[in-house]
RNA sequence: GCCCCCGUCGUCUAGCCAGGCCUAGGACACCGGCCUUUCACGCCGGCGACACGGGUUCGAAUCCCGUCGGGGGCACCA
């Protein structure tokens, strides 16, 4: 049974890089009919917050990632919040202490930091010396009496080379001399990541650990702990990281990188899902637009790349546009767009929003663009800039508008067909055509030089509104 | 500094494992054209890459070695 997990620490919004990791875990689980476990890694008391956990869950759900076990849904291996598993960790810490795989260390953090800096500046690998490895009971007692609280360190064996096969990267060898005895319990009594991750993954029967490349160098430490605790070692797969435009690890410096930010910008979760899946993975046939089901069906961890990928916002925008105009149904799109209309002060009912979207969906790539693109459907008293005023004052423009008004002022309906017919008549009667003919009407109706098709606009706003707008312009530029 | 990973168009990538089918394919972006009352959509076309240097081979993007470049890690963060 395939069991994988996504284990974020609740320290802020869900980052797209983490979202991608969650997504690949999800895809792997679903493809193999396995289970996805959500585990909250909140052992860092300083930075973890419950609100962040709630936001994480919300963002993950929004993206369309579902899990089988987790802090919100429970499961056979509960609890799924590390802060609630402290007793479990304690047991295993004691075990390591008893078997001599770990020991208490009374060194002060300030001293160690100094040593670290010194080693770095001298070009030596910064690693702990191991000086507390062989403390006598008397020495321990002395430290205790001084009130120094110890940390617990894992005893790293000398000269071992850890070898494992990464599902994505293949054969990996790392010599453990690279690092010294590392801390597994902090001074405040909280166990650290490298330790708890092993205990949890083992106890939760995780079969495949799929995570970011930045964890690759932690893997030997963890394997050492698996061995010390006599746990079976899972398979590992290290995903390439996601880069920003400058080819460094994608971070806040690169602009909006949280899933929440994309949601608020008006991205479709399906588009982000699709896009993220394509970052480092590629289906057998050359296709860009794939549904969740298709991706699950085709996903194979072996097809995941080794090299990192740049997060290409432009392509994401394009993909989102495809979802907006071709994939999401009009009703669904309207439901999602409603909050955006309201945010921009465009107040109307659902049916009206639907008509507007029908007219503009081909020209927007995110729902935020509704602000500009839908303006003519809602704003009557728009301003004219200088350039526009000049144009409207010109003789032909004014004549066209005047003629148009004459022809519609007594009508009680005006369809796209009627509109086109009327424009043809004006063309014949005034001898004005093309841009000269349509542009004045566009300006009078929208105040803008480009935008939605006038026939579509008229269809939606209706004849009375058209009359009002035209009349207003006529009066303004008499 | 040390360790690990990576290297095909500007970007995402196909091809690499099983060398010839590759004058290297697709997508985004860009440029041009068509459609069109405008913008957009759509359609058609163009530009554009095997990091470099050595091997191996009749033949290398594909195999080997080296160089260079990029990234990640080296915490009482996860």
Image (tube, coloured by chain):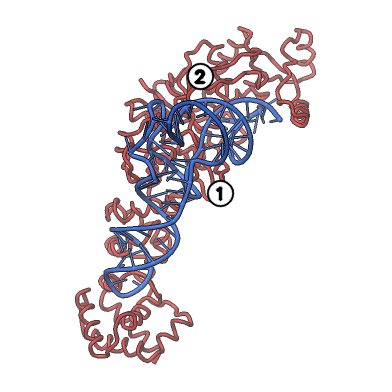
Chain colours: A red, B blue
Above or below, comparing residue A339 to residue B76 in the picture: below
Between disc 2 and disc 1, whose residue precedes? Answer: 2
Say which mark, if any, is on residue A164. 2
* Residue A339 percent location from the top left of the image: 39, 56
Q: Residues within 10 Å of mark 1 (few under 14, many from 20)?
A: some
Quadrant of residue A158 within the rendered picture: top right
Above or below, comparing residue B46 to residue A412 in the picture: above
- Which is nearer the eye, B17 or A461? B17
Q: In what element is the residue under mark 2? A: strand
* Residue A468 percent location from the top left of the image: 32, 81
Quadrant of residue A251 within the rendered picture: top right
- Which is nearer the eye, A303 or A317? A303
State yes or no: discs 2 and 1 in contact (Cβ < 8 Å).
no
Q: Is residue A137 visible?
A: yes
- Which is nearer the eye, A390 or A57? A390
Residue depicted at 25% across the width and 82% down the height: A423
Which chain does the residue under circle 1 lie in?
Answer: A
- Which is nearer the eye, A23 or A430? A430
Above or below, comparing residue A364 to residue A53 in the picture: below
Say which mark, if any, is on residue A254. 1
Give me the C-alpha separation between circle 2 and circle 1: 34 Å
Q: Is residue A86 visible?
A: no
């Amino acid at each position: 049974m395939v069991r994988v997990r996504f284990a974020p620490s609740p320290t802020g919004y869900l980052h797209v890089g983490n979202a991608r990791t969650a997504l690949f875990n999800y895809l792997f689980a679903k493809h193999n009919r396995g289970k996805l476990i959500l585990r909250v890694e909140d052992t860092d008391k300083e930075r973890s917050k419950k609100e962040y956990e709630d936001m994480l869950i919300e963002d993950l759900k929004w993206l369309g990632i579902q899990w089988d076990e987790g802090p919100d849904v429970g499961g056979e291996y509960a609890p799924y919040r590390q802060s609630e598993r402290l007793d479990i960790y304690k047991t295993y810490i004691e075990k390591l202490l008893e078997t001599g795989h770990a020991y208490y260390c009374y060194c002060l953090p300030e001293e160690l930091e100094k040593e670290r800096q010194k080693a770095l500046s001298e070009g030596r690998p910064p690693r702990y010396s191991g000086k507390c490895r062989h403390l006598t009971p008397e020495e321990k007692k002395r430290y205790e009496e001084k009130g120094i609280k110890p940390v617990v360190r894992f005893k790293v064996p000398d000269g071992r080379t850890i070898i494992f096969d990464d599902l994505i990267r293949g054969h990996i060898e790392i010599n453990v001399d690279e690092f010294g005895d590392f801390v597994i319990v902090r001074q405040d009594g909280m166990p650290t990541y490298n330790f708890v991750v092993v205990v949890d993954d083992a106890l939760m029967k995780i079969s495949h650990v799929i995570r970011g490349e930045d964890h690759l160098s932690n893997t030997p430490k963890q394997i050492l702990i698996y061995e010390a605790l006599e746990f079976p070692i899972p398979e590992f797969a290290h995903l390439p990281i996601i880069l920003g435009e400058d080819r460094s690890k994608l971070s806040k410096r690169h602009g909006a990188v949280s899933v929440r930010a994309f949601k608020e910008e008006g991205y479709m979760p399906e588009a982000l899902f699709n896009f993220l899946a394509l970052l480092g993975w590629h289906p057998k046939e050359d296709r860009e637009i794939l549904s969740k089901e298709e991706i699950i069906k085709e996903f194979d961890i072996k097809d995941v790349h080794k090299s990192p990928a740049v997060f290409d916002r432009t392509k994401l925008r394009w993909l989102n546009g495809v979802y907006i105009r071709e994939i999401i149904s009009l009703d669904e799109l309207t439901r999602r767009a409603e909050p955006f209309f309201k945010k921009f002060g465009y107040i109307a009912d659902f049916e009206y929003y639907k008509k507007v979207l029908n007219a503009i969906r081909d020209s927007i790539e995110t729902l935020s663009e509704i602000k500009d693109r839908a303006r003519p459907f809602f704003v009557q008293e728009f301003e004219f800039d200088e350039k526009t005023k000049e144009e409207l004052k010109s003789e032909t423009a004014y004549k066209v508008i005047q003629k148009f008004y004459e022809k519609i002022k007594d009508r009680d309906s005006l369809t796209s067909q009627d509109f086109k017919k009327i424009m043809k008549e004006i063309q014949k009667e005034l001898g004005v055509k093309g841009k000269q003919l349509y542009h004045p009407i566009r300006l009078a109706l929208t105040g803008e030089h480009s935008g939605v098709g006038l026939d579509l606009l008229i269809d939606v706003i209706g004849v009375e509104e058209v009359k009002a707008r035209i009349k207003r312009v006529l009066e303004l530029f008499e």
